[in-house]
Amino acid sequence: MLAVGLVFVLVGLFGAAVGAARLARQQARVAADFGALAGAGQVLDGDVAACARAGEVTRANGGRLVACRLDGLDVLITAQVEVSPLPGLRRTATVTARAGPVRG
């Protein structure tokens, strides 16, 4: 009976770790998307202003700006979110997003 209970606890911990990793990935995606959109709004002011604004919005959404560059009128940023689903286990979700004017 004790072994069955331990299996249930381990499965529950594994499920919680997977859920936390998925949540971190989604949070990184949101932070990167919003950061890129904010940076694209400042692209005419130059790369320093665009990347500064992208960093502010990325941090406000729980992420950390890792990279930012301009490609013409597009802003490309990379955001990271770290999660610690279990004690001693640390994972990092990294997402890249692009925002700019509509083409076509």
Image: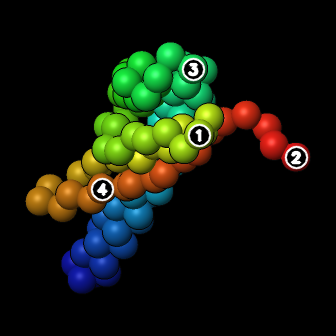
Residue picked out by circle 3: 44
Relative height, residue 13 to residue 42 (above, below): below
Q: Quadrant of the N terminus?
A: bottom left
Quick one: SS at disc 2? loop
Mark 3 burial class by Cα count in 10 Å: few <14, some 14-19, many 20+: few
Residue 76, position in %: x, y? 51, 44
Residue 11 appears in view: yes
Instruction: Give residue 16's mark.
Output: none
- Gap in angstroms between the C-alphas marked 1 and 2: 16 Å
Residue picked out by circle 2: 104
Comparing 14 with 100, the one in front is: 100
Mark 2 burial class by Cα count in 10 Å: few <14, some 14-19, many 20+: few
Q: Is residue 5 left or right of residue 103?
A: left
- Gap in angstroms between the C-alphas marked 4 and 2: 35 Å
Residue 34 appears in view: no
Residue picked out by circle 1: 72
Quarter of the image for residue 14 reads bottom left
Q: Nearer the viewer, mark 4 or mark 3?
A: 3
Q: Name the kind of residue labelled 4 in the image.
A: Thr
Quick one: SS at disc 3? helix
The answer to whether the residue labelled 2 contacts the one labelled 3, judged by CB atoms less than 8 Å apart, is: no
Q: Name the kind of residue labelled 1 in the image.
A: Gly
Q: Residue furthest right?
A: 104
**Number of marks in picture:** 4
Q: Nearer the viewer, mark 1 or mark 2?
A: 1
Task: Identify which residue is drawn at 30% across, 56% down.
Answer: 92
Q: Name the kind of residue labelled 2 in the image.
A: Gly
Q: Name the kind of residue labelled 3 in the image.
A: Leu
Quarter of the image for residue 99 reads top right
